[in-house]
Amino acid sequence: MKTVIPKSPKMDFIGPIWWHPHGMKMQVKGSDENSLTIAGSAAKIVITRESGSYPGWFIDWAIQHSGTTQASGRTFFLNDELKAAFGLTDESGDYGDLLIERYGGDSANQGQYIRSNIFLNIPCPGTGHDGDPNVSIEIDDSIKRAVQKLLG
């Protein structure tokens, strides 16, 4: 993890142009010491502890675009990467500066996330419209607290 120079993203009505407004609907839906679920009307992420030989966190994400189309995937975060993604620090991954230079933001890491202030996309920036293969989340205090609790 490293510190990068933030760059203001191009903004739309609510947030960065790469962020979808459905991110405002995302809320903590469940948590325990090993997992956290954040979901809204069309998207969900599940953060699950991986305690094997390479400890960290799997993030499984899914988006229901319509009755017949969806996108889903999985990415892996170390503790410091999860903290940065959810605004607990402003560090970035080794290749985050490339995303920030192109799309604007405060913190990023390729294949994992991009964040500008409270606006988070997992695993990548998008167009800000339906059909994007990423989940947008507005990081509110309850989400921040839940991630901090999960990390211990």
Image: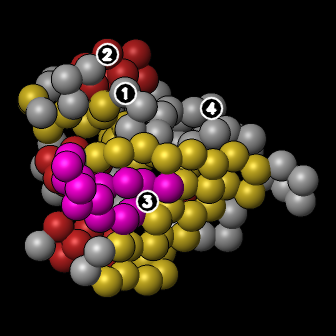
- Quick one: label 1 or label 4, which is nearer the N terminus? 1
Q: Which mark is residue 110?
A: 1
Q: Which residue is mark 2?
A: 98
Q: CA distance from mark 1 to mark 2?
A: 8 Å
Kindly report which numbered mark, 1 or 4, lies closer to the viewer in this rendering. Answer: 1
Q: Which mark is residue 145?
A: none
Question: Of 23 and 146, which appears nearest the observer?
Answer: 146
- Asked if labels 3 and 4 touch by Cβ distance under 8 angstroms, the answer is no
- By secondary structure, the bulk of the magenta-drawn segment is best described as strand
User: Helix, strand or loop at disc 4?
Assistant: loop
Q: Which residue is mark 3?
A: 138
Relative to residue 39, is residue 53 depicted above or below? Answer: above
In reply to whether residue 53 is colored magenta, the answer given is yes
Residue drawn at x 47%, y 70% is 38
Q: Amino acid at mark 3?
A: Glu
Q: CA distance from mark 2 to mark 4?
A: 18 Å
Kindly report which numbered mark, 2 or 3, lies closer to the viewer in this rendering. Answer: 2
User: Helix, strand or loop at disc 1?
Assistant: loop
